[in-house]
Each structure stands twice: as structure tokens, then as C-alpha cells.
Amino acid sequence: MSAERRDSRGRGPGRRESSGRRENPGKNTAKFRQKDLDPARVAARDTLRAVRERDAYANLVLPKMLRERRIEGRDAAFATELAYGTARAQGLVDAVIESAAQRPVADIDGKVLDVLRLGTYQLLRTRVGAHAAVSTSVDIVRSENGMGPSGFANAVLRKVSQKTEEMWVDELAPSPAEDLVGYLAFQYAHPRWIAEVFRDALGGSAGQLQAALAADDERPPVHLVARPGFMTAEELALTSGGDVGDYSPYCVYLPGGDPADVAAIREGYAGVQDEGSQLVARAVAVAEVADDGGRWLDMCAGPGGKAALIGSLAEIDGARLDAVEVSDHRADLIRKVVSDLPVTIHVADARSSGLDEGFDRILLDAPCSGLGSLRRRPESRWRRKPSDVDELVVLQKELLTEALRLVKPGGVVIYSTCSPHPAETTAVVADVVASVDGVRQLDARPLVTVGKLGADLLGDGPHVQLWPHVHGTDAMFLAALTRE
């Protein structure tokens, strides 16, 4: 948990900007000491505000903001660390703020709270000096809210700075002797219910749970995908400055920088895609089927990453891919990445798409809770509720039942979720297999045994469950089914 080093004022090299905002300008100018504000911190603050006020997604808001404000290099890296890290650690950060402020965060003005969260994150989880973290935060509050709120922010952050993260955890977390799951959930900034889900999916191992939560609490690496038939992973690594991935034959690990700066991505020869998702898409193309007539289907295709990879493989094999997506907006995103591939897009509910049955290969990457990609969607862990899963399970079963109707005898259905929740994974598969005649689950492990990913890393099967702390991927689930 570290950020780029800042100078004595907590600033890195690059352009400076004034907030351009004063409370009551004119006769009260002397009341406010207007200072130039660090653009990286302002961008991070504005991102958190968008997340709080508009339920925006940080990973969509911040990159656009950095480009528009021309924040680059180390300043961009620092803004990214602050925005994503603060959003990811919000539960822990808020507990510390409440203790220091002696009031619930719900009672703190939202605009001040955004800055308190940024300041607290810097104090607890970065190498920024305490003085710089406090003073820059106070300056931001003062520029917008005035002397009273800035004095409050100063007092809270100074109290936060008196203890390390470890000291705050020991003071505020449940006792590990009495409630280990609660302690680990607090320490690694996860809602308790999600930690319980991970524990159950990992077979109750405390050591595995700690490793999984710790990996989920880290800033994830960027994975690129080279589109087969357009370029190889080796070529992408060479041109992007990255390293060829360990598992997927199309994957490249990007060490840093903005993926939008990679020429191959701008030209449509590559994309950004987690290696686990690449393995799922590849499994559709490499699974054995009785007689491949070249009819492939992606049932829930938006926003198009897997459809682009499967479509590229379909073109090499002389097949065609039908891609179904219920949302017009997400269908447009698919069109942008598959325009030069043998892919036909259908805007429809995949449960009643109107497509004729008889598909050879079907991918059902079902809508899910997304608990497997929390590290890439920093604010989502605090938005999800256990009740979300109950609603999704009904949809997942309906979709999988329809997929098994559409697949031809001897064909294959790949069911996947970006979630390790047993209710969304093994339970869905078991219930549908038990309720649909003539369906058999296959061993999915051979479909992802590639590169350095050997059987020793894939468990007992027949499904595959990937994990960040074991495989370095998102926690993707994969099951393979066929119809007699």
C-alpha cells in the first residue's frame, strides 16, 4: 500500500492548479488563505465525490478526468493510488474517522468527508509525510468550505496521524481471538459478509481467507489481451513494454502507465482484459464438441471483451459468433470491438432471444455480484448487499437453463461468473443439472490447463475457481456442461 513519493509539501512534479474557488470573495478575501492545490489530490477528491453523489464508478470517472485535466506521469499515478485506494479502503477509513471525530461519518458534510477520507488514507496507507497529508487536505477543505470546516478537518486528521494503521486496527477491529473473520474483514477493508463468503468458498481455511482478502486489498496489475489473428502476446509485450502472461497465451502484464497509450489498443489489435477472463473465453473455443458446425454463442456479451476474443478465435476456425446483449448501450460497446470480426449482435434478453437452438459452443458469462473483481472496482464492495445475490441467482438459473436448451447434443456450455460465491457458482450448476434432463457436467480443468497453470493449481474439479492470491487473476468461476 504505497504511493509515489511526494516532495516536502506532498506534491510530485508536474502542473499545478489553483482551485479557482473562494468562499465569499471580496470583503472576506483575507479570511481564506488561497493556495495552489495539488491537481492530483483534487482529481482524487472529485472522483470520490462523483462516487458518493452519483454512484459513479471510480475506474470510469478518473481516467477521463486525468486526460481532460492533462494530469500525467507521477501525478496521474498518485491520483490513481489515492482515488482507488481510498475507495477500496473506505470501511476501515470511515471507522478511523468516526473514532477521531467522535461522530458518525453520516453526520459529516459530504464534501468535507471526501477530503477526510483522502487525508486518512494518505496517513495510514502511503508514504506521504503526516504534515503534508494533513496540510494539503486542510487546504482543499478551506478552499471550498472555509475556516470552520478546515479547522475541523485539521483536528480530525491530526488525531488520525497519532496512530499507525496497525494501531487503529488493533483498537477498532473485533478481537481476532473471538472473531477472526470480523478482524480480517476490518483489517483488509471488506464488509464482513463478503469475508464470510470468501471463507466458505475457500473451505473455511483462515490462512486462505487472509491471503484472499489481502490480495483483494491490493492495487491490481493491468492485464492486456492480444487479439489472435491480429498480433501475438510476444508482439504486444514488445511494443507495450510489458511481460508475457503466465497462463493465457494472449495475455501481457503491463507494469504501469495508461493502457490507452498502448498503440496496439488504439489500433484495435489488443484490449484490456483480466487474464482470468481470457481463460474463460479461450475455454469456449478449445472445449471438445461432438461436431462443430461453426455456430457459437455469447449469451450475455456486453461490454464485449470476451466476445472480441471468442470472435477472433471463431474467425481463425471459420466459425461465426452470435452475441446477445439486453442493453442498447452495452451492445454499442460490443460493436466497437467486434466490427471487423464474424460476430452478429442481437439486442435481446438472453432468456428469450428468439435464436434457434443447435449451437455448438455457448458462453454464459452470467450477470453476477462481481465479488471476484472487487480489486478492480474499488467502491463496489461497499455497494453490494447480500440480498443482491438472491436476486441474481434466480436470473443465473434461468439463463443457464436456456443455454442448455440452445446447445445442440454433444455441444458445450461454459458457465462463468466473476464471483466465488457458492450460491452463484457451484449451487447454480448443481441445481440446473438436477432439474434439466440429459445434462452432464464436464471436467473444466483441462480447458484452462495452459502455460504455467497446471492441475496442481486447479483443485479437485470438476469446476475451476480462480483466485487473486493463488493465480493472480480475478476470482473467476468456470463450469463446463453438455447435453446428451
Image: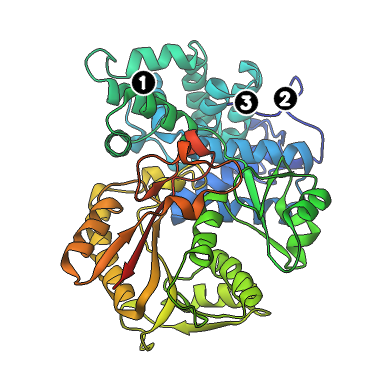
Please provide percent x and percent y for residue 401: 26, 72
Q: Amino acid at mark 1?
A: Ser
How many marks are shown on the rendered structure? 3
Q: Secondary structure at mark 3?
A: loop
Q: Secondary structure at mark 2?
A: loop
For the point 49% across and 69% down, the residue is 302
Disc sitting over residue 460 in the figure: none
**Residue 229 in which image quadrant:** bottom right
Whole-Å distance between the Cαs marked 2 and 1?
28 Å
Numbered disc in front, either 3 or 2: 3
For the point 53% across and 54% down, the residue is 279
Kindly check if marks 1 and 3 are in contact, taking CB atoms under 8 A apart as contact: no
Q: Earlier in the sequence, mark 2 or mark 1?
A: 2
| Residue 296, visible in the rendered structure | yes
Horizontal relation, residue 255 to residue 205: left or right: right
Q: Amino acid at mark 3?
A: Ser
| Residue 112, visible in the rendered structure | no
Q: Amino acid at mark 2?
A: Arg
Q: Earlier in the sequence, mark 1 or mark 3?
A: 3
Please provide percent x and percent y for residue 358: 38, 84
Q: Nearer the viewer, residue 65 or 125?
A: 125
Q: Is residue 39 above or below residue 389?
A: above
Residue annotated with mark 2: 5
Q: Quadrant of the N terminus?
A: top right
Residue annotated with mark 3: 2
Q: Quadrant of the C terminus?
A: bottom left
Residue annotated with mark 1: 99
